[in-house]
Image (cartoon, rainbow, N blue to C red):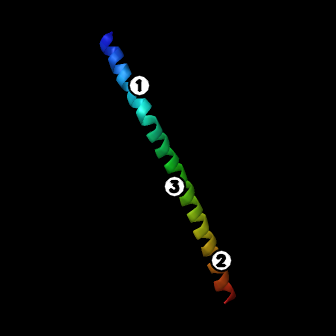
Amino acid sequence: MNTAMNYLTVLFVFLLLAAPSLYGAAHDRRIDRQIRQARQAREAGLQDRRAGFAKVA
């Protein structure tokens, strides 16, 4: 019983210390995804605009 409590204590402390880092990594991934989507949307808009200029010229 004592050994199981020791393992649970170590696991709890590990999760307590790792939680902020894991939360930050998830936050960074979300921001990277948003930046990538915005960049793709911007590039698609520029390509449409270039195609419009080519038709005029």
Task: Give the residue at mark 1.
Answer: 12
Left or right, residue 27 beside residue 2: right
Q: Position of residue 44 (x, y in %)?
A: 60, 69
> Dot 2, how many residues are within 10 Å of its Cα: few (below 14), some (14-19), or many (20+)?
few
* Whole-number angstrom distance, CA of label 2 to CA of label 1: 55 Å
* Whole-number angstrom distance, CA of label 2 to CA of label 3: 26 Å
Element type where label 2 sits in the image: helix
Q: Residue furthest left?
A: 3
Left or right, residue 24 beside residue 7: right
The C terminus lies in quadrant:
bottom right
Q: Position of residue 43 (x, y in %)?
A: 58, 70
Element type where label 1 sits in the image: helix
Looking at the picture, tell me which residue is in the foreground, 34 or 21: 21
* Whole-number angstrom distance, CA of label 3 to CA of label 1: 30 Å
Q: Position of residue 2 (x, y in %)?
A: 32, 11
Q: Identify residue type, mark 2.
A: Arg
Picture disc at residue 36: none
Task: Give the residue at mark 2.
Answer: 49
